[in-house]
Amino acid sequence: METLFIGRNCIRLSETESTNTYAINLLKEVNVPEGTLIITEHQTNGRGQRGTTWVAEPGSNITCSLIIHPDFLTLNEHFLISKIIALSIQKTIQDFLITDKSDVKIKWPNDIMVKGLKISGILIENSIQDARIKNSVIGFGINVNQSTFWELNKIATSIFCLNKRKSNCDEIINSVCSYFESYYLKLKQNKYNSINDEYFKQLLHYNEIFQYKEIDSGKMLSGKIVNIENNGWIVIETFPDNEIKKYSLKEISFLRPEFI
């Protein structure tokens, strides 16, 4: 691992319920060094955003969690962590793809997509103390060598499906850790603007008209993303009336083209 501290302390498990759950329990028991990485070949009950599950073929993909102690960030800045892990995974996948590099995009709030198909998901769980983030457990999964997703083939893909050859999971993890460490050190130096600039360049639907649905009202709307605030709220300028609306992650859903 060619990093200073991210991923240098690594715990490998053949199987666990969830790497995030394991990490959270570990933090309750011992002082965990910053940058500790928990990796497993098989999650029996992997968790995703909004109460969903993360399903990965055992031994074929990356399922892991990273522990950091970002107490320099306030609660209202928590989504900066999501931005830098998303960038780290997005850039790593670009590096490992033979073609389709420009099609790798970050989808708010927590997915990495290639040509409209999900290749990676993120789940971040924070513990708060005095309105600051004491610990952050960053769980992420990357579809690497899985060749089929059965009933999910229309919405998921992997590096293998795109490259038609297998990749080394450890090399991919090392790359994510290297990118993440670089971005994390920028965060510590208050270089938020440069991180946001990079994030928006890779964000799906940024300044592009797309369709979405308000979950509570069921209303279908068109608009473009004009900002993702550091607290995680998405800011959309509706089309054609140019109204500015803000939503949390549980308040809207993106519509796939076939449903429009």
Image (cartoon, rainbow, N blue to C red):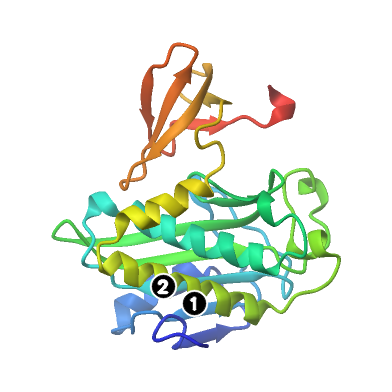
Residue at numbered disc 1? 178
Residue shown at the point (82%, 51%) measured from the top left: 150
Left or right for 164, reference 19: right
Q: Residue furthest top?
A: 241
CB contact under 8 Å: marks 2 and 1: yes
* Residue 45 shows in this picture: no
Amino acid on which the number 1 mark rests in the picture: Ser
Amino acid at the residue labelled 2:
Ser
Kind of element beneath mark 1: helix
Position above or below: 9 against 74 = below
Q: Quadrant of residue 36?
A: bottom left
* Position in image of residue 82 (x %, y %): 42, 56
Give how far across and how far down residue 165 sits, in percent: 84, 71
**Foreground residue, 41 or 246?**
246
With 216 as the anchor, is 232 left or right in this view?
A: left
Q: Which residue is mark 2?
A: 182
Q: Indicate left or right for 188 with 83 as reference.
A: left
Question: Where residue 78 sits in the image (x, y, percent)?
Answer: 31, 54
Residue visible at 36% across and 69% down in the picture: 184
